[in-house]
Image (tube, rainbow, N blue to C red):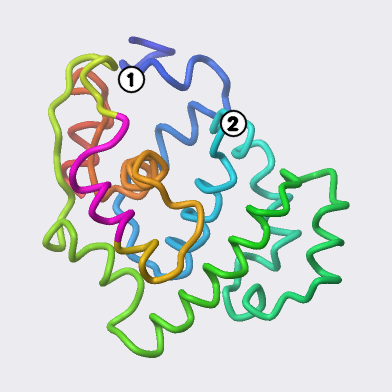
């Protein structure tokens, strides 16, 4: 449980990048519409891979995908898709790339016709993080009724790569739920945010 000076969740191991992600980002409530879009897309790219793979490529993804600006991504052409398919710095999966484009188009529509993407997501948890009190990694679910409901609604709106397991990982990462183990120093810190 203790990786370094402070007790933490075991999943980041000792990789400095992973530990920093755990200690500084994971579970911190995110309310920015664009940042939430980026995280959803990266979680979609992670499907079938380890998160550390995406984390190591995150800067390359940001460069390749124009800083995850949905306004730009929504207008990507087939030529841009081919350029992304040729970019060895990122995960080159055509369906995921095309899914990011479609999701950007849906995101833009939501931003124009509703209170916004952040408001939509946070409504699922009544505007405040769900603070779980899991003691072991075995206790942490891969999906929940809440992630299934959010996934269903996102899919209905046209988002891609947003199954209930992906959505639960997204909820954990963006602080919609606090799934730091109770013995982790970040559980209490994130609960106070």
Q: 146 or 119, which lies in front?
A: 146
Q: Earlier in the sequence, mark 1 or mark 2?
A: 1
Q: Is residue 67 left or right of residue 79?
A: left
Magenta run includes residue 37 = no
SS for dot 2: loop
From the viewer's perspective, is residue 134 above or below residue 93?
above
Q: Is residue 176 left or right of residue 38?
A: left
Q: 187 or 164, which lies in front?
A: 164
Magenta run includes residue 147 = yes
Circle 2 crowding by C-alpha within 10 Å: few under 14, some 14–19, many from 20: few
SS for dot 1: loop
Question: What secondary structure predominates along the stretch shown in magenta?
Answer: helix
Residue that appears at 67% across and 58% down: 97
Q: Quadrant of the N terminus?
A: top left
Which of the two discs, 1 and 2, sits closer to the camera?
Answer: 2
Image x and y of residue 77, in percent: 78, 76
Q: 59 or 43, which lies in front?
A: 43
Image x and y of residue 8, in percent: 33, 20
Residue 23: quadrant of the picture: top left
Residue that appears at 40% across and 83% down: 111
Q: Which residue is mark 2?
A: 49
Question: Which label sits on residue 8?
Answer: 1
Q: How far is disc 1 from disc 2 in space, using C-alphas?
A: 23 Å
From the viewer's perspective, is residue 24 above or below residue 149?
above
Image x and y of residue 167, in percent: 36, 47
Highlighted magenta segment, given as a residue range: 142-152
Q: 156 or 77, which lies in front?
A: 156
Residue that appears at 75% across and 59% down: 64
Image x and y of residue 42, in percent: 55, 49
Q: Is residue 133 left or right of residue 106?
A: left
Question: Which label sits on residue 182?
Answer: none
Residue 95: quadrant of the picture: bottom right
């Amino acid at each position: 449980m203790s990786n370094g000076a402070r007790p933490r969740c075991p999943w980041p191991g000792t990789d400095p990048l992973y530990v920093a992600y755990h200690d500084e980002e994971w579970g911190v409530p995110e309310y920015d519409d664009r940042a939430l879009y980026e995280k959803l897309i990266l979680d979609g790219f992670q499907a079938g891979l380890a998160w550390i793979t995406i984390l190591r490529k995150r800067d390359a993804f940001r460069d390749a995908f124009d800083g995850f600006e949905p306004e730009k991504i929504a207008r990507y052409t087939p030529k841009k898709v081919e350029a992304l398919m040729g970019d060895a710095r990122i995960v080159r999966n055509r369906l995921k790339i095309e899914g990011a484009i479609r999701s950007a188009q849906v995101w833009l529509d939501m931003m124009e016709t509703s209170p916004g993407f952040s408001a939509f997501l946070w409504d699922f948890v009544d505007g405040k993080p769900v603070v779980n009190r899991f003691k072991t990694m075995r206790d942490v679910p891969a999906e929940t009724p809440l992630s299934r409901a959010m996934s269903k609604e996102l899919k209905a709106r046209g988002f891609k790569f947003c199954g209930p397991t992906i959505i639960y990982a997204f909820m954990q990462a963006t602080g919609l739920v606090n799934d730091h183990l109770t013995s982790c120093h970040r559980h209490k810190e994130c609960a106070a945010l």
